[in-house]
Image (tube, rainbow, N blue to C red):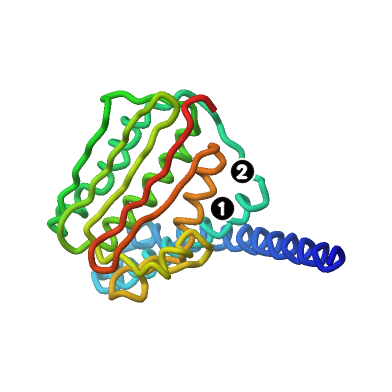
Amino acid sequence: LIAAHRELVKLERLKTEFITTVSHELRTPLGIMREGVSQVVEGLHGEISEGQRQYLGKSLSHMERLTRIVNSILEIANLEAGKIGLRMESVDIAALAREMIRMFELVAQNKNIEIRVGFSNEKIELPGDKNKLGQVFTGLIDNAVKFTEKGYIEIQIQETADTVECVVADTGRGMTKEASANVFDRFQQFGREYGPGQKGVGLGLAIAKGIVELHKGKIWLESELGKGTRVSFSLPKGL
């Protein structure tokens, strides 16, 4: 059993190293291609037709999507390998949430989805990594907008003496209890089987979980198929 455990640890380390190496190697050529196509679309190398511009625009969009996928794979590998640290500071998480919400107001408006906000205080401070916590909010709100076709999305932040609890809830398509049980695992397709729409690589919630746990917090999900999803995470105020 000890030998088998050591072999599993070795294989896991080799897998993580492989993912990290491949992700790093993909980022450079992707960046070069994206920059080259961008320059052509912007007309920096001569005039192009509207048809060419539309075709190259689609190519650029897919390159950007692939770049996001590679970055997500690299980040989850680094999280699991313990290679990501936190730049701690005092964070007004209420202001941070409002900033992240503004990024999605237009797309929510285009889908006729209402964004509701409920904070216990105008200013709620706690120690944390502002960029990483912003990434958690971005991922959760993005999922809510992506998988909600009608109704609303609600972001709540409640402060207690020791913790801050944040909630991103929606009235979207939801999921079964079986899917909910594994939703924080890597490469789980959040809601993929329940209808058409945008698809991801299935790492967003795994990354959010890793970041929350780095802050010594907890994250959990409640969902019902056809009725919506509620993702909550709590963070300690005395980290």
Give the position of the C terminus as an image quadrant.
top right
Spot the residue most to the left.
112
Label 2 packing within 10 angstroms: few (<14), some (14-19), many (20+): some
In the image, residue 189 sits, relative to residue 109, either above or below, namely below
Q: Quadrant of residue 96?
A: top left
Vertical comparison of 213 with 142: above or below? above
Give the SS element for disc 2.
loop
Instruction: Determine which of the numbered discs, if any, sits on residue 25 in the image.
Output: none
Taking the spot 19% from the left edge, 50% from the top edge, the residue there is 106
Q: Which residue is mark 2?
A: 84
Image point 59% across, 63% down: which residue?
Answer: 26
Residue highlighted by disc 1 = 75
In the rendered structure, the answer to whether residue 4 lies left or right of residue 23 reads right
**Where is residue 35 drawn, in percent x and y?**
46, 57
Closer to the N terminus: mark 2 or mark 1?
A: 1
As rendered, which of 130 and 228 lies closer to the eye? 228
Is 100 above or below relative to 126?
A: below
In this view of the protein, can residue 32 be seen by the observer? Answer: no
Q: How many marks?
A: 2
Q: Is residue 14 left or right of residue 227?
A: right
Distance from label 2 to label 1 (Cα)?
8 Å
Q: Amino acid at mark 2?
A: Ile
Percent x, y of residue 52: 30, 72
